[in-house]
Image (spheres, helix red, strand yellow):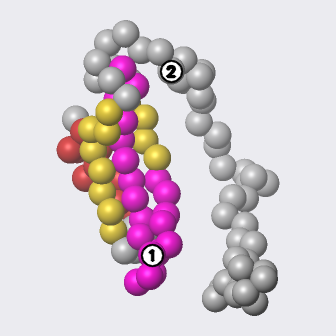
Amino acid sequence: MREAGLRTSWKRKFVSTTDSTHTLPVIENVLDRQFDVAEPTRTLVSCITYIRTAQGWLYLAVVLDLNSRRMVGRSMVPTMLAGLVMPVLTTAL
């Protein structure tokens, strides 16, 4: 790219997404990094992430079963709303 004089069309800006200095209660880590689970559907984990697309941001929420390592629920929406995760958990259960 350098030899051809090509450059990216946008530059990433640093965005701080986490504020660690708060007075809110911190939830106890009940999983304690125990990722080997013997029973199916006994331990479910979830994650929310965002993906940049040509049309804008897409928000993705998934629930995984730690026993089978399979996705048991997912949801994708164009806006980050509080109701993003509840349908995923309902589907997973």
Of labels 1 and 2, earlier in sequence is 2
The answer to whether one can see residue 18 in this image is yes
**Which residues are drawn in magenta?**
48-67
Kind of residue sitting beneath label 1: Thr
Kind of residue sitting beneath label 2: Phe
The answer to whether one can see residue 86 in this image is no
Magenta stretch: residue 66 in it?
A: yes
Q: Report x, y in % for residue 31.
A: 53, 23
Q: Nearer the viewer, residue 78 or 24?
A: 78
- In the displayed structure, would residue 64 be above or below residue 15? above
Q: Secondary structure at mark 1?
A: strand
Q: Residue furthest top?
A: 38
Could you tell me which residue is drawn at 32 percent across and 33 percent down? 70
Could you tell me which residue is drawn at 37 percent across and 36 percent down? 64
In the rendered image, which quarter contains the N terminus? bottom right
Foreground disc of the pair 1, 2: 1
- In the displayed structure, would residue 71 be above or below residue 78? above
Magenta: main secondary structure: strand
Q: Tell me, yes or no, whether the two marked residues, 1 and 2, touch with CB atoms within 8 Å.
A: no
Q: Which residue is mark 1?
A: 53
In the image, is 62 to the left or to the right of 14?
left
Q: Report x, y in % for residue 10.
A: 66, 86
Could you tell me which residue is drawn at 22 percent across and 44 percent down? 90
In the image, is 52 to the left or to the right of 15?
left
Q: Secondary structure at mark 2?
A: loop
| Few, some or many residues within 10 Å of mark 1 (<14, 14–19, 20+) | few
Q: Which residue is mark 2?
A: 35
Residue 36, numbered label: none
Could you tell me which residue is drawn at 36 percent across and 41 percent down? 63
Distance, label 1 to label 2, CA atoms, is 32 Å
Quadrant in the picture for residue 66? top left
Q: Report x, y in % for residue 35.
A: 50, 21
